[in-house]
Amino acid sequence: MEQRRFSGKGHWYHETQSSTGQAQALPLVPEAATVTDRFLLDLVLPDDVIAPCQSWLEPARALYDRLFPRSVTVSRQRTFSAYDRLSTALTVAQVYGVQRLCNHYAARLAPLPGPDSSRESNYRLAQITQYARQLASSPEVIDARAREQLEEVGLTTWDIVLMDQIIGFIGFQARVIAAFQALLCQPVRWLPGMDVQQDAAAEPFSRSESRWTPGLASVEPHFASPAQLKALAQWQPLPALRVLAPVLAHEPPLLNALGEIVQSELCATLDAALVDLVALLTARINGSLDCFNTLATSALPDAPLAALRSGERALNSWSKADPQARAVIQAVQLLTRAADRFSAAQFTPLVEQGLSPQQAVNLLAWSGLCGWLNRLKIALGDTH
């Protein structure tokens, strides 16, 4: 079975299997591969907007270079090739539907040789693609069996950690770009018929206590490299990374960049109650019970916590008395569920309710980072 991408589908869609041969299909926007800013993808923004964001944009740019270098050397421990990385990125970009993102990863993927045409390679790529699509679109369905299926096709712990970081990173990138495009009042271009992410089931969130356990082997301090020990010492004290760091430390450069984003000034100018509300809302939508319960001990009042546990209808009822919270909830809900549909219609009310444009961007970027952390918690462990 020969690997290929449908030329008729252009850059928006790629298949893992085919039974017929075709000439190599070029992306519809080949210049998208040569952007200068590979995180914002050459989106032109005013200096007064972009300058306050540098504390988290710089590590995001550095992480892009780590995840998608121009060449990749594979080994027995690290089998994820350049094609695997960019194929996964394009799969996730397609889930979120942000056109600028799809153009870029399709253009980077197009010239790369795919895996061989054996049944094993086809099955491996199919499993990777299915997992990436599920974690991006319906994260709550990922469980221990999903990890086992990746191991059955030959993926190592290092591969799975890398892939989960790629999936989380692309989700963050998609939402940051969508937020900036909404700030610029650029029209949205979403494909009719594209699915909207459904909220996770409410029943698990009736529990106020939970315990997260890693589903992959953690880095053992006695056998860790100096880089792994340094990364653990630096980032495990952060509450957001406390339980994740021992697993993420398999790839210290990726953990370092994520830690810098988490520790950045992203939320420095934001009201703590809004920061907590956004984090709880994304955890509720994505189905990350442990993220939710860890945050539920915050200073947020009981009423919004109860409404969040119950679901959208209860949350909308509670927020009617608080116009700013209502604007934040509506914006974060759409950005989390369908980034391709997010526009000025959701961004403008944030400014009208007292946030500066920079604060609104940071709050929306924070929701994207929370979604990233939600997916890491879901993908790398189990909640009991």
Image: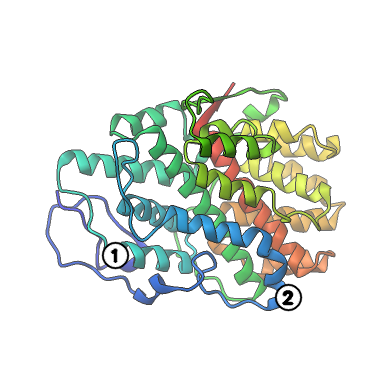
Q: Which mark is residue 48?
A: 2
Q: Could you tell me which quadrant the C terminus lies in? A: top right
Q: Name, please, the residue furthest toward the front.
A: 226
The residue nearer to you, when weighing 215 against 230, is 230
Task: Return the x and y of residue 211 as percentages of the image width and height.
Answer: 63, 22
Task: Return the x and y of residue 39 as percentages of the image width and height.
Answer: 52, 64
Q: Does label 1 or label 2 sit earlier along the sequence?
A: 2
Task: Return the x and y of residue 374 as percentages of the image width and height.
Answer: 59, 40
- Can you identify the residue that label 1 sits on? 110
The residue nearer to you, when weighing 296 against 89, is 89
What amino acid is at disc 1?
Ala
Q: Residue at x 15, y 67 (%)?
A: 23
Residue 26 figure quarter: bottom left
Q: Which mark is residue 232?
A: none
Q: Do the CB atoms of the residues marked 1 and 2 lie less than 8 Å apart?
A: no
Residue 210 figure quarter: top right
What amino acid is at disc 2?
Asp
The residue nearer to you, when weighing 76 against 108, is 76
Does the image show residue 369?
yes
